[in-house]
Every structure is written in structure tokens, then in C-alpha cells.
Image (cartoon, helix red, strand yellow):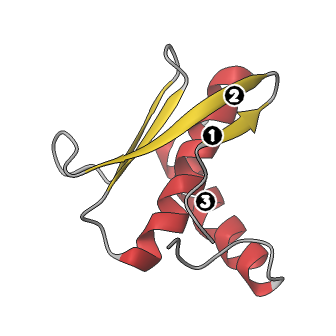
Amino acid sequence: MNLPESIQVGPFRYGVSAEQKLEGDRWGHCDANWRIITLAKDMPPRQQSVTLLHEIIHAADDVFNIDLKEHQVQVLAHSLAQALSSMGAWPEKFE
């Protein structure tokens, strides 16, 4: 599966892009103001799908005012990625 160009989160469409290096040691970032999810190109391939899901959860947190803590986002991303991958509904990595 290819990395999607955009993702619908609630009533909003978030663009998805990949950059060579992100600020600090980040693998991903969700900009709620510009509605853009950015992933680092230099992360391990299998980490990319979990990171995208992590940033989608941040987007949903912002759109729906859930007020999740970072630890909660991490746990949700890893557990949902594993569950969805086991059903063939989420890729382990993107091309």
C-alpha cells in the first residue's frame, strides 16, 4: 500500500507528506492548524504505519476535543495498528 496523500478526520481532510528529517527526534507531526500530517522518511519502514496512525489519533484528538495524553496516543496507535494489521485492514509498512 502506498502512503496516502490525505486522510479524512471527522469533517476535515488532512494532507499527508513525508520529509527527509523532522525537527528533533520526531518520526511524525500533526499540524492541526494547517491540517497536515508529516512523517519522517528516515524512520524504519515498519514504524511508518504506526507513526501515521499515531498522528491520525492526534488529529482526531484535536478535531473532537478528546484531550488525550501522549501516552494514551502511543498505546492506542500501537494496539490499533496491531489489531488492524492482523485483520489485513492496515499495512505493516507503506511502499
* Residue 67 shows up from this direction: no
Q: Nearer the viewer, residue 79 or 46?
A: 46
Q: Earlier in the sequence, mark 3 or mark 1?
A: 1
Q: Residue at x 19, y 49 (%)?
A: 21
In the image, 57 versus 72, the foreground residue is 57
At which x and y percent is residue 79?
67, 70
How dense is the environment of label 1, judged by Cα within 10 Å: few (below 14), some, or many (20 and up)?
some
Residue under label 3: 77
Instruction: Indicate whether 50 appears above or below 84.
Output: above
Q: CA distance from mark 3 to mark 2?
A: 19 Å
Picture coordinates of residue 73 (x, y %)?
A: 57, 49
Q: Classify residue 58 by image quadrant.
A: top right
Could you tell me residue 53's position as x and y percent?
A: 60, 55
Which residue corresponds to the image point at 67% horizontal and 78% vertical from the top-left?
82
- Which residue is label 1 attached to? 6
* Residue 13 marker: 2
